[in-house]
Image (spheres, grey):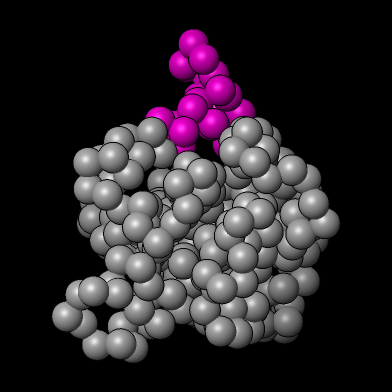
Amino acid sequence: GLTVSGARPSLVEYVRQLWDRRHFILAFSRAKLTAQYSQAKLGQLWQVATPLLNAAVYFFIFGLLLGARRGIPHEVYVPFLVTGVFVFTFTQSSVLAGVRAISGNLGLVRALHFPRASLPVSFALQQLQQLLFSMIVLVVVVMAFGSPPALSWLLVVPALLLQFVFNTGLALIFARMGSKTPDLAQLMPFVLRTWMYASGVMFSIPAMLHDKDVPGWLAEVLQWNPAAVYMDLVRFALIDDYGSAYLPPHVWAFALGWALLAGVIGFVYFWKAEERYGRG
């Protein structure tokens, strides 16, 4: 009748334990969100100011100096860019937080018994809450450039929910990898920056590659990458002049597929090492 202390539960039991800790997950994510800018004088305003400042820098460099607005109507480019920055930052921050979810909370992991997936899930939830604050500013920007509220705005909800599942899966994957390789936290900003440039945050991928000597399928592959998919869906939902012609074929199917793939693989991959977190 004896069991090994800290042994990994079955997958079904692990899901049940995680559900039982849902209040802890929500409270932990809120506490992290509140503490994030507690030492700054502007406090929580930095949640919105940081991506806005990034968007301003990208607009100056890519929109004005490098002419990356090709293929995008002039009045659409600013909301196009700001939406891309906000949505990509959601994924970027979830991954970076996931890398440190275990290695940065070893005291908590070693002191208390709880499903370790609670930590990366909490960090992904924290980034979702931060994005929701930022959406207020995004809505103002979109309306200021000629896109009044419409029923299509409701499509933002399923798009961001699918992105949240995708982000959580990535956070779980990188939480396990980061728990054994802390140096991964130093490498990931470079990986994510490369991903950002390949995802059309500041430019239209088909328009940018139209006159380049590259294979025709490359634009489709880049448009189907998950970051580009979720950005396109939110842009399509919010921006009047960003119609279906800008979307790759079967974009909702890809959004669902990426979410399920990352979510399932990430959860199982993390669960398989449950008993090893915080040891050694």
Whether residue 99 is visible to the viewer of this picture, yes or no, is: no
Residue at the far left: name it. 213
Front in this rendered view, residue 29 or 46: 46
| Camera sees residue 48 | yes
Q: Position of residue 80 (x, y in %)?
A: 50, 50
Q: Residue furthest top?
A: 41
- The location of residue 90, given as percent across then percent down, is 52, 51
Residue drawn at (20%, 75%), measured in percent from left and top? 212
Q: Residue at x 35, y 39 (%)?
A: 59
Q: Residue at x 23, y 74 (%)?
A: 211
Quadrant, the N terminus: bottom right
Q: Residue furthest right?
A: 151
Quadrant in which residue 174 is drawn: bottom left
Near-viewer residue (203 or 5): 203
Magenta span: predominant SS is: helix
Q: Is residue 43 magenta?
A: yes
Relative to 221, residue 233 above or below: above
Residue located 43% across and 75% down the image: 223
Question: Within the image, what quadrant is residue 169 found in?
Answer: bottom right
Is residue 50 covered in magenta? yes
Seen from the viewer's position, the closer of residues 196 and 124 is 196
Residue 13 drawn at (x, y percent) = 73, 77
- Tell me how many marks there are: 0
Q: Please report the bounds of the magenta region as a residue range.
A: 29-53
Q: Nearer the viewer, residue 22 or 217?
A: 217
Picture quarter containing residue 16?
A: bottom right
Residue 147 coordinates in the image, percent (x, y): 68, 45
Above or below, comparing residue 250 to residue 75 in the picture: below
Which quarter of the figure is the C terminus placed in?
bottom left
